[in-house]
Amino acid sequence: MADNLVIVESPAKAKTIEKYLGKRYKVVASMGHVRDLPRSQTGIDTDNNYEPKYITIRGKGPLLKDLKKEANKAKKIFLASDPDREGEAIAWHLSHALGEDKEYYRVVFNEITKDAIKESFKHPGEINQKLVDAQQARRILDRLVGYNISPVLWKKVKKGLSAGRVQSVALKLIIDRENEIRAFKPEEYWTITGQFKYGKHKFEGKFNRLADEKIKLKTNEHVEYVLSKLDGDAFNVDSVEKKEKKRFPAKPFTTSSLQQEAARKLNFKARKTMMVAQQLYEGIDVKKAGTIGLITYMRTDSTRISPVAQKEATDYIENQYGNDFVGPKPSGKKTEGSQDAHEAVRPTSANRTPENMKQYLSRDQYRLYKLIWDRFIASLMAPAILDTVRMEMSNNGVIFRSNGQTIKFKGFMQIYVESRDDEEEELNNRLPEIEEGETTNSEQIDPKQHFTQPPPRFTEARLVKTLEEVGIGRPSTYAPTLDTIQKRNYVKVDQKRFIPTELGEIVNQSVTQYFPDIIDVEFTRTMEKSLDDIAEGDASWVAVIDEFYKGFEPQVSRADEEMEKIEIKDEPAGEDCEKCGSPMVYKMGRYGKFMACSNFPDCRNTKAIVKSIGVKCPKCNEGDVVERKSKKNRIFYGCDRYPECDFISWDRPIGRSCPKCEHYLVETKKGKTAKVKCTNCDYEEKAE
């Protein structure tokens, strides 16, 4: 019989850890929290120092009973939940639920590897009450906000709504951006691009300025004036400036930067990124080696790397690429505003390369692991060296400028380059070897009209980055926040960008008017700082909550009395119910919009919203192909005669037949590249 009981959150984690500890340890899973605030009431005694009322989570009774049996048999009980505030709270709740008469040992580790596990069990500690208090303060704060504002919204606007500290600020950011876009007035401007030739080499340059006067190309008249000054095709090379420029690698991932990069490179939602990262952290079965945690803990705001991991990665880089590719030692400085409780998100071993691990991983696991591994290794590599050239050419006082940039030494770019929301600067744009005083000729001068663009709507990556920059939320809050505002139908996603709904704008307006602190960025940032102070032992959680609640409670009373009832009318769908003849309206459900009969509950007829793409069904040649959405919100195409015709396609049929085999053609997209392919043979062509 095992002398020691180890309690972790998940079965996968338990399986991995038990293998390292041996027979004297029994490792079991609590399946997350075992106690929480009741769902049916606020559960906070505001008259008694905000004392929380914790109950056993529904359905956890049998599990808790089994855990108590195991705890009673064990000589020592180790609580090994995750190394963050939430994990500390889980350990604290377990100690109370299993009986305070026992002695508990707290063990924490940043990675689930044999060495890390063995080391942590050599030096067990106690539950960190300061971290527990910080987590409890956040939970109580969010409960007071949610369970006081939400009933007001249900009463005045619509049932099922919610408001919260972080989600309300995230929604406000999205709506503020939408208002900027609405108020934006485009301004006309022009560019003049020249195609030049020097010997056999062709290159591009852009109008920069006039030598003797200032001019901005705001109208076609300005362009015509510049073009009228040109005298022939010959341009004199006035200056050639050559420089060597270093480009440094991105730091290893934090939770936020991992979510951003996974969204940009892998098209992962924040929730999916965290789910797959959790799997990689808890352990993957690597056959002969057994179950191994492949990455370090994925909830972190630090870019710090342990000396051991750094040495192993540096050795790998030197062996694979040579000493020239080894970068300088990281500074190890704490990022401003970060808690720095854990290391960066990194592979637990640089030698477990993505290609070696690929056979043991699912497609999503492999893609995310490769992203994490690539970023970590690249962060310790030498900077890339770029040769840059800036050349200016003139013709009768009209000056064009051409920029060239080539990679002289790849450095970290051998493995990985961070993506960006905006366009990546062009590399390997070579200019000819030309000296000052020489002449080059223009082959074509091409003026183009443009209009300034409004600020872009938020993508998931951009919103997470903004929340982090303004100090709202913490690594563990981003994914559930984005999830909540979509589930509540406060925003919809179009082309990967957030657009506020009418409901979202109504809720934001109501919260802004009656609860200004909740949506105030500075107030929310200050509250996050107060929670950090509690974790550091520099503030009392009761005092922090009390200061907030004294100002918040009167706002709730005022909103309940003064907020006017808002009626949200259903949007007409433009057709009648085939069952009772009443008008159909649009409703919002769990999986998005659908049509429902306005005569509900007397008539419960519902229909999916379908959109014809103007193409006949290639299978039955009778119905039309319509666009539909799966339960996971993925677009697919089917016949509107379903179930009579069961045609289905993930790719969009284009209504033409293949010239080789006469099967139907579809349009496929990969990133920004679109192709037309045959569904039967190897024929393909460029999409228009």
Image: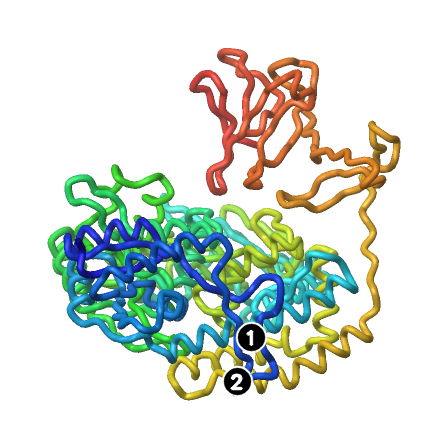
* Residue for point 59% across, 65% down: 167
> Residue most toward the right?
581
Along the horizontal axis of the image, is 406 left or right of 585?
Answer: left
Mark 1 Cα-neighbour bin, 10 Å: few <14, some 14–19, many ≥20 = many
Along the horizontal axis of the image, is 342 left or right of 603?
Answer: left
Question: Residue 455 appears at what percent x and percent y?
Answer: 61, 62
Q: Are marks 2 and 1 in contact (CB under 8 Å)?
A: yes
- Front residue of this view, candidates 259 and 297: 297
In the rendered image, the vertical position of residue 191 relative to residue 471, given as above or below: above
Question: Residue 23 appears at what percent x and percent y?
Answer: 15, 52
Q: Which residue is mark 1?
A: 141
- Front residue of this view, candidates 579 and 246: 579
**Quarter in which the C terminus is drawn:** top right
* Residue for point 25% across, 46% down: 354
Question: Residue 104 appears at what percent x and percent y?
Answer: 27, 70
Which mark, residue 544?
A: 2
Residue 332, picture quadrant: bottom left
Q: Amino acid at mark 2?
A: Val
